[in-house]
Amino acid sequence: MNSKYLAAAAALLLGGAAQAETFAIQAGRVIVDAAKAPLGPSTIVVENGRIVRVEPGATAPAGATIVDQRGRTVMPGLIDAHVHLTGDPGTPFWREAIDSDELAAIVGVKNALLTARAGFTTVRDLGAPGLSSFALRDAIRDGLVPGPRIIASGGALSIVGGHGDVSGYRPAVNAALDPGGTCTGPDQCALRVREWSKRGSDVIKITSTGGVLSQQGRGLEGHFEPARSRRSPRPRTALA
């Protein structure tokens, strides 16, 4: 597991060429396990985009491209479990009724690069306009733009008027901002899950309670409840 995350960090550091060459990353220190002390001066050998070994000291296989990071600490890529790459903090929510989904994807390209440069190699994007997070995820996966690996949810499931349902504006604006994830009852909620899965969701986000960004004061109590069992009605007894 540690080698996989180190490989992801190395690939971001070295760029696309890491897939076809051998690199020797000479580091001042290497963190391979958060529960253990860092290694001292070491060399990380990367072949065809994968870490094959970590050697003590500043070494290099014959023909390898040397990446001198002896003044730095090399560590596994970080993971952020909740991001919204296609928007910028502080942007008014109502801008989604004006700005296009295509613009959101372009904003995501900018933020994906910033996130990768901050050391994050995997993120979970939990909400974006339209299909913008899916487009960004696929572009990064295919090597079109740089960025971390993205696990994307698309929209979120919510009760009507809940944390994931837009309210507080004129009905026409609410409709324009609606991500299409409200549902009532197990059948309708199952349908919403299948709809987002069909669009390309890697994970389903459920706003199971209210939150600090809710448009309505729904509180932090549970919004969804377990489905009640559906028992068949007892047969009636005919009386003579």
Image: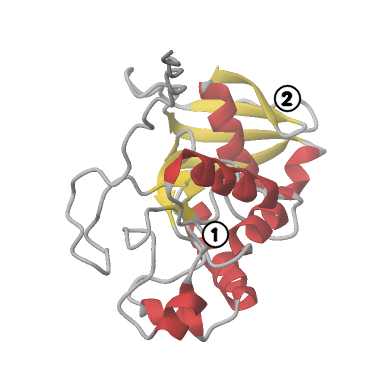
Reading the chain from its start, which is encountered first: label 2 or label 1? 2
Secondary structure category for the residue under label 1: helix
Q: Nearer the viewer, residue 227 or 214?
A: 227
Q: Nearer the viewer, residue 3 or 124?
A: 124
Residue 136: image location, x then y, percent: 64, 59
Q: Foreground residue, 11 or 156?
A: 156
Question: Which dot marks residue 112?
Answer: 1
| Mark seen at residue 61 | 2
Question: Does residue 13 show up?
Answer: no
Number of other residues with Cα within 10 Å of mark 1, as a class: few under 14, some 14 to 19, many 20 or more: many
The answer to whether residue 195 is visible is yes
Cα–Cα gap, marks 2 and 1: 33 Å
* Residue found 37% across the figure and 86% down from its top: 170
Q: Quadrant of residue 213?
A: bottom left
**Three-letter residue code for mark 1:** Ala
Tell me residue 124's x, y (percent): 49, 46
In the picture provided, is 223 more to the left or to the right than 195?
left
The answer to whether the residue labelled 2 contacts the one labelled 1, judged by CB atoms less than 8 Å apart, is: no
Residue appearing at x 47%, y 22% in the figure: 232
Who's the residue at 55% across and 61% down the image? Answer: 113
Q: Is residue 226 above or below residue 236?
A: below
- Quick one: label 2, few (<14), some, or many (20+) residues within 10 Å? few
